[in-house]
Image (spheres, rainbow, N blue to C red):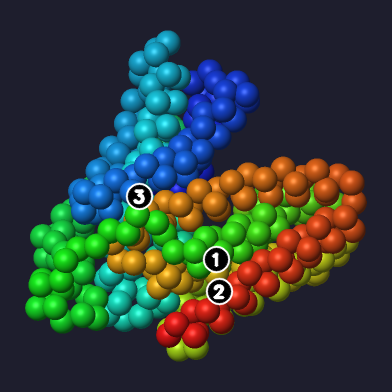
Amino acid sequence: MVYEGARAITGPFLASLGASALLVGVVTGAGEAAALVLRLVSGPLADRSGRYWSLTIVGYALTAVCVPLMAVAPFLGGAGLAFGATMVLLERTGKAVRSPSKSALLAHAARAVGRGRGFAVHKALDQVGAFAGPLLVAGVIALTARTWAGLAVLAVPGAAAMALLVVVRRRVPDMTVFDEEPLEVRASAPIEHPTRLPRIFYVFAVSCAASTLGLMTFGIISFHLVEADLVRPAAVPLVYALAMAVEAVAALATGFAYDRVGARVLLALPVLVALVPLLAFADTLRLVLVGLVVWGLAVGIQDSTVKALVADLVPSGRLATAYGVFAAFQGAAALAGGALGGALYDNGVTDLVVVIGVCQAASLVLLTSVVRRRGAAG
């Protein structure tokens, strides 16, 4: 709720402080880069130090504090823009600090119910917050006509999140209690921290990166919707809401399926991604909407169920490192995919379909090898 609520108005808010379009792009782009790249540092740090809870709480605290503090910027005069931009960057840094540790803690906790289900429920709740945060901000701004008020009110869900974290930390200081091994075995066994992640993990990371490379961003799809005169700009958020709802359902469905049938449920991912450009860039609204549903299905799997397999592929003591490295692969592929998609769209949809199809064929081959090796190991 907190960070999605802020992201919904970050651009207009910085502009109200005097930022140019270029500066808004630089600040938000640098923030997203920091949120991904810095995980290469925070992930190994968590595994080496064992301070998963500390890094998780510090990361969430940065978001819970920095977002409401953005509301102070309009009252700082000439220093307001610099202060607001700094808060944006610190909030994204908080995302990088907490994400690997949070995912590692969740991977342990989810063992009690199934990792597929655990990551699926996490993603579904994440989507609830992604809806509620912007709606809360929009409602407050509509009532007060003050953008800063919409940011200030996010202190409430931020405080609630921090309180819940403290409660859970006190009740379950060691999430490994949910692992399968008996407590006495874990207590007597030495803690191992392998220096390298397994090769199969990197094969899986490359496979998912190939899928991400071909998974068009909603920005390009929405550009097509308006450019082809299929919907009016004001209706684009409603279309996006449809895709987000599908994403939440897909995360739940595939997560539950993962616990039942295993990693082979992920073989649907490259197929879905390959279908997106064929449908989402069609000339009729009906086909485009079908394409958006397929896009939502793919994103739902990509953002949730794949994390369950990451946890099953790496040693317990290297989970945070693995999630940091995996995020770096995904971030680099997303950046390249966005540029590739935009360039190929301008040259014609046919080229886009062919290139993405090739990427997904490669992804499917790699993923199949991972699933087979995982099945043989299991």
Using the image, determine if residue 378 lies above or below residue 43.
below
- How packed mark 2 is, by other alpha carbons closer than 10 Å (few <14, some 14-19, many 20 or more), is many
**Neighbourhood count class around disc 3 (C-alpha, 10 Å): few under 14, some 14–19, many 20 upward:** many
- Mark 3 or mark 1, which is nearer the start of the sequence? 3
The residue at which mark 3 appears reads as 43
Q: Tell me the number on the disc at residue 3.
A: none
Number of numbered tags placed on the structure image: 3
Q: Residue at x 27, y 71 (%)?
A: 109
Q: Quote the CA–CA distance across marks 3 and 2.
A: 23 Å
Where 215 sits versus 376, above or below? above
Asked if disc 3 and disc 2 are in contact, CB closer than 8 Å, the reply is no
The answer to whether residue 119 is seen in the rendering is no
Q: What's the residue at 32%, 31% (across, down)? A: 69
Q: Position of residue 270 (x, y in %)?
A: 67, 70
Q: Position of residue 249 (x, y in %)?
A: 52, 74
Q: CA distance from mark 1 to mark 3?
A: 18 Å
| Amino acid type, label 2 | Val
Residue flagged by tag 1: what amino acid is it? Answer: Phe
Q: Is residue 35 left or right of residue 67?
A: right
Helix, strand or loop under label 3: helix
> Does 295 sit left or right of 201 as displayed?
right
Residue 145 coordinates in the image, percent (x, y): 46, 34
Which residue does the numbered mark 1 point to in the structure image?
204
Q: Which residue is mark 2?
A: 370
